[in-house]
Image (cartoon, rainbow, N blue to C red):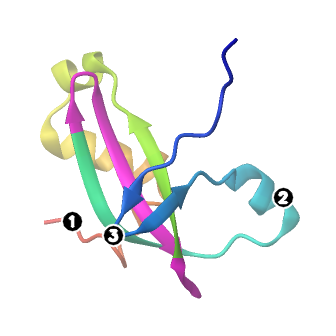
Amino acid sequence: MSTVSQPKVCLFHVTLKYVDLAALSMSGSLMPSVPVQLMLKFDPPKISIVYHFEHKQNERYFHDIMIEKRLLESMSEEDLASHLYVTEAYYFNPKQIRRQ
């Protein structure tokens, strides 16, 4: 018998949670996110963002962004960064994560 559960990661004794942004947005309770850590995985390519909401610093959440290998092969670094800032605008807020 197997059970499926939400993955939990401990970071500095803080349990990370997944949030359904669509549900929060539709309910009108979506607050700005503040990223605190970016993590990279190379195989398969993935960026994980650890963040908290603007007025809830003690509650940390995570968001995974899978990167298709074809994008890595066909786009320049600048184009890929632009793509992430457009498609993941909630997490890649230029006020929080500056482009350099």
User: Which disc, if any, is residue 99?
Assistant: 1
Q: Earlier in the sequence, mark 1 or mark 2?
A: 2
- The answer to whether residue 44 is magenta is yes
Q: Earlier in the sequence, mark 1 or mark 3?
A: 3
The residue tagged 3 is 12
Q: Amino acid at mark 1?
A: Arg
Q: CA distance from mark 1 to mark 3?
A: 27 Å
Residue 10 sits in quarter: bottom left
Q: Earlier in the sequence, mark 2 or mark 3?
A: 3
**What residue is drawn where x is 26% and y is 18%?**
69
The residue tagged 2 is 26
Q: Is residue 90 visible?
A: no
Q: Amino acid at mark 2?
A: Met
- The answer to whether residue 32 is magenta is no
> Which quadrant: the C terminus?
bottom left
Q: Amino acid at mark 3?
A: Phe
Secondary element at image label 2: helix
For disc 2, the neighbor class at 10 Å (few under 14, some 14 to 19, many from 20) is few
Nearest to the observer: residue 52 or residue 71: 52
Which stretch is magenta? Answer: 41-58
Left or right, 53 with respect to 96, comes to: right
